[in-house]
Amino acid sequence: MNWSRPPPCVRETHITSLRRVIGNLLDNALRYGSGAPVTVTLDCSEAKAVVRVLDRGPGIPADQREAVFRPFHRLEQSRSTDTGGSGLGLAIARQLADASGWTIRLLEREGGGTTAEVILPAGQHPEAPGR
């Protein structure tokens, strides 16, 4: 995994939810990234913070990028849960992001693979999900 330390970016947020969202995105990137390094970036401005998890896996077809956020939806139905997961990671990530006022989306990565983005707007700090 590649990580470079960005300039300071301070946001008051739900750390447990953010860890879970980023953790689920990292798990997917590592699992489906074809063994290539995974890159994590952070861009920060007064308006928003954007965390990106970039992999070099097979990518997600454009017509499936929203469907993969549905519970139990898996791109490759032939995979067993031993090798492909349960299909809940992205659904959980989307649910936590939505409850926290964040945006999560999947994009095609230039050169192949997927870019997963989590956008945290400035000034938002709703009650923690489940409270």
Image (spheres, rainbow, N blue to C red):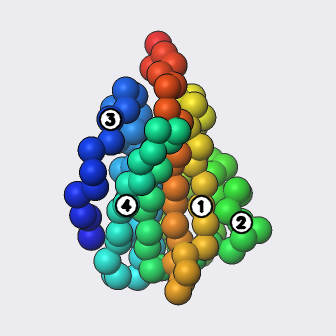
Q: Is residue 19 left or right of residue 75?
A: left
Question: Is residue 111 in view?
Answer: yes
Residue 77 located left or right of residue 90: right
Question: Residue 1 has which mark?
Answer: none
Residue at image location 55% in from the left, 81% down from the top: 110
Cα gap from disc 3 to disc 1, whole angstroms: 24 Å
Q: The residue under label 3 is which amino acid type?
A: Val
Q: Secondary structure at mark 4?
A: strand
| Rendered image quadrant of residue 108 | bottom right
Q: Residues within 10 Å of mark 1 (few under 14, many from 20)?
A: many
Secondary element type, mark 1: strand
- Camera sees residue 27: no
The answer to which of marks 4 and 2 sits earlier in the sequence is 4
Residue linked to disc 1: 106
Amino acid tagged 4: Thr
Give the labeled residue for mark 2. Answer: 64
- Report if the CB atoms under discs 4 and 1 are less than 8 Å apart: no
- SS at badge 2: helix
